[in-house]
């Protein structure tokens, strides 16, 4: 019946069948001609892009390390990274994908009704913890076998590990941040012992740490959002009572948490000055939770591999690790590390999508040729590659500065730059990764949208990089604060560093026009900053994001030029720096010229945003809000 009804279509299909498959016969049987048989649909399957050695295939990573590391350090690191480059594209990638496929779950009660609050993670997640210890992913940064270069070597490993790791990079970020805090605070007792666990290479001893800052009232405005209180006990420890709203990787062994110390009258100090930092273990020796109830695991857009939870602290035993009232300043040590990890994670995802897309372009054949041979496609990939290279050099510069500071080798200029660039890099690479990965998915056509290719997960996981550890605007305002607080010193350090990098390339004619563009942009930045100072606080806040972007683009440009001037640089290194400098390097200037920061700009923005909204108020209310921004 079916056959007869579809006869004309079948006849048509049969005429085309030979082009698709080998199953052509002179006498067709009925099973060969039904519309959805294999012979009719065809036998073509698109080749999958495979992932090669992530060290050997990354020319810039290898070039950067060769350029910077002392020869003996490079020789040793090179060997280890080559081995690790293969491990991340095989064993570790498989484990990471298993973590995505088997997300953590919360078992709140046992079979007999007893509250247990167990966070159950898959074997792959546990294996990644063991691998992290074995590979020294935290230890390298603290053993300092290679002095100030240890951080660069560590970052190279993290850079390859991150996009394969099923987000295990997240607990590592917090672990490194906590280690830094415990080192800076010179903590003794249980927090001091924890330092040894966090930096251990022995999987049996290795610990990971959490970072508990965010509460229901505030993730950004920690000073006004933290309600957790700490009550001192006779033995000098504290008991914490509060509700932590986002706690990433809640299966950690320990954590650092902010809370307000309660005095004998039950009062606490409000604001930043009331916050102190505490160390606590999640479980006791018997595995019982330390006065903690896991309320639920979060339902997230991405990072589903991570057990992110809401926690009730109901008398959790804790140790004070900061001076009283210096909690924010102390946890800032951790924030700066996790922001650097965020930037490493962002650029590493960009690298991964570009590597995968370029491989795919050599296999996918359409419109009569491989897509690598379609000019527009290759141009798209090249633009993405320029973004990756720029982001990579920014992140590695940050890590290089961190290494100098931690080994007491940093100049004042280096320290200023480190503080500034930690925020700038986090905000800029966070935005870059979302745009680049989104473009990257498009390179696979519809396949980029299919969950079982494991590609969409990269985009979902990237989106958080603009949010956690400070949103783009929070970091833009932080950048502004850093510049304002130093009374010109940080800006001076920035300009001097850019000039030094450009000077190192001054004898290279092929870089001359890039250098000129960067000099001009630096000049325009200085002029606009001067102008902004006279425009007042509201204008400065409105300019903060454009300012941060300007700093990022100019600094990245200088880094690309500096790298391109290296004696062993490739023609592509030179080309990348030229392409980078073709964009608007000073968006601050363009927006200022357009009047975006003028006195009435906020009112116009309000009118624009709220036109048609039932909550739309009047211009007067916009003016009132302008007055309250101090
Ligand atoms: O927990 C989260 C998720 C964890 C998982 C993420 C893992 C990442 C893995 C990536 C892998 C790929 S997310 C939590 C996110 N929350 C934040 O990031 C907070 C965002 N908000 C801010 O950054 C704000 O700017 C605050 C909280 C730092 C601002 O607080 P306040 O109350 O306004 O305080 P101040 O006055 O700005 O700063 C208090 C002190 C000052 O020092 P003093 O008192 O000496 O003048 C500041 O200079 O802290 C100092 N300070 C810093 N110092 C503040 N920020 C810094 C800094 N970044 N570095 C050095």
Image (cartoon, rainbow, N blue to C red):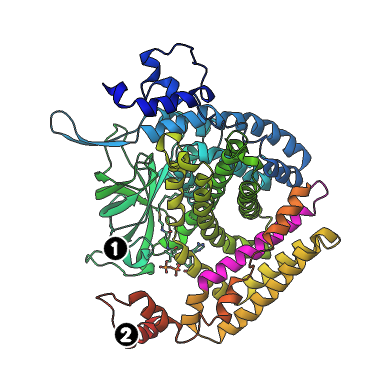
Residue 379 versus residue 497: which sits nearer the camera?
Answer: 379
Which residue is at 36% across, 14% downward?
Answer: 30
- Badge number at residue 621: 2
Which residue is at 69% across, 55% downward?
Answer: 409
- Badge number at residue 612: none
Instruction: From the top left corner, tell me how far across and down residue 347 is, in percent.
Output: 57, 49
Point out the stretch of residues depicted in magenta: 544-569
Left-right relation of 183 to 373: left
Left-right relation of 287 to 14: left
Label 1 packing within 10 angstroms: few (<14), some (14-19), many (20+): some
Instruction: From the top left corner, tell me how far across and down residue 385 is, in percent.
Output: 63, 49
Q: Quadrant of residue 496?
A: bottom right
- The quadrant of the image that shows the C terminus is bottom left
- 457 to 92, vertically: above or below: below
- Badge number at residue 217: 1
Q: Quadrant for ligand 1?
A: bottom left
Q: Nearer the viewer, mark 2 or mark 1?
A: 2
Q: How far apart in space, not on screen, are marks 2 and 1 (Cα)?
A: 25 Å
Instruction: Tell me, yes or no, whether the highlighted magenta stretch contains residue 554.
Output: yes
């Amino acid at each position: 019946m079916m056959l007869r009804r579809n006869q004309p279509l079948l006849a048509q299909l049969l005429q085309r069948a030979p082009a698709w498959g080998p199953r052509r016969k002179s006498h067709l049987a009925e099973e060969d001609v039904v519309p959805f048989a294999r012979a009719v649909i065809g036998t073509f399957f698109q080749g999958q892009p495979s992932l090669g050695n992530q060290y050997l295939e990354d020319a810039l990573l290898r070039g950067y390390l060769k350029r910077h590391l002392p020869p003996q350090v490079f020789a040793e690191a090179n060997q280890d990274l080559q081995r690790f480059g293969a491990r991340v594209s095989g064993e570790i990638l498989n484990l990471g994908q298993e973590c995505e496929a088997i997300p953590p779950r919360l078992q709140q009660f046992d079979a007999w009704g007893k509250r247990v609050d167990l966070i159950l993670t898959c074997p792959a997640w546990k294996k990644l913890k063991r691998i992290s210890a074995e590979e020294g992913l935290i230890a390298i940064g603290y053993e300092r076998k290679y002095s100030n270069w240890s951080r660069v070597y560590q970052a190279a490993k993290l850079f390859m590990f991150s996009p394969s790791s099923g987000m295990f990079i997240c607990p590592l970020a917090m672990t490194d941040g906590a280690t830094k805090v415990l080192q800076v605070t010179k903590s003794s007792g249980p927090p001091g012992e924890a330092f040894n666990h966090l930096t251990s290479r022995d999987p049996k001893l290795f610990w990971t740490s959490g970072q508990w800052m965010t509460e229901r009232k505030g993730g950004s405005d920690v000073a006004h959002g933290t309600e957790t209180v700490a009550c001192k006990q006779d033995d000098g420890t504290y008991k914490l009572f509060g509700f932590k709203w986002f706690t990433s990787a809640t299966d950690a062994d320990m954590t650092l948490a902010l809370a307000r110390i309660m005095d004998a009258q039950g009062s606490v100090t409000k604001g930043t000055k009331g916050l102190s930092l505490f160390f606590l273990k999640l479980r006791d020796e018997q595995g019982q939770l330390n006065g903690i109830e896991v309320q639920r695991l979060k339902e997230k857009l991405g990072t589903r591999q991570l057990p992110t939870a809401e926690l009730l602290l109901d008398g959790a035993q804790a140790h004070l690790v900061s001076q009283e009232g210096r909690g924010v300043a102390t946890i800032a040590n951790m924030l700066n590390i996790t922001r650097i990890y965020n930037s490493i994670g962002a650029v590493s995802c960009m690298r991964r999508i570009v590597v995968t897309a370029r491989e795919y372009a050599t296999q996918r054949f359409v419109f009569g040729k491989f897509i690598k041979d379609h000019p527009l496609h290759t141009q798209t990939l090249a633009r993405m590659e320029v973004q990756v290279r720029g982001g990579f050099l920014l992140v590695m510069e940050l890590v290089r500065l961190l290494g100098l500071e931690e080994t007491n080798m940093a100049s004042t200029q280096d320290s200023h730059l480190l503080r500034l660039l930690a925020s700038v890099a986090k905000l800029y690479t966070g935005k870059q990764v979302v745009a680049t990965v989104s473009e990257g998915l498009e390179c696979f056509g519809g396949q980029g949208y299919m969950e079982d290719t494991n590609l969409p997960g990269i985009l979902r996981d990237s989106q958080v990089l603009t949010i956690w550890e400070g949103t783009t605007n929070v970091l833009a305002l932080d950048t502004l604060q850093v510049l304002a607080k130093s009374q010109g010193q940080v800006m001076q350090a920035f300009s001097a560093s850019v000039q030094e990098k450009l000077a190192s390339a001054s004898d290279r004619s092929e870089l001359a026009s890039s250098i000129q563009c960067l000099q001009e942009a630096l000049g325009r930045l200085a002029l606009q900053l001067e102008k902004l100072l006279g425009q007042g606080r509201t204008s400065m806040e409105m300019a903060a994001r454009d300012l941060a972007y300007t700093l990022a683009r100019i600094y990245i440009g200088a880094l690309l030029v500096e790298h391109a001037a290296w004696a062993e640089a490739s023609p592509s290194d030179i080309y990348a720096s030229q392409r980078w400098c073709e964009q608007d390097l000073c968006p601050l200037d363009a927006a200022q010229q357009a009047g975006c920061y003028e006195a009435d700009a906020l009112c116009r923005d309000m009118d624009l945003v709220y036109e048609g909204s039932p909550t739309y108020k009047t211009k007067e209310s916009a003016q009132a809000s302008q007055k309250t921004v101090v």
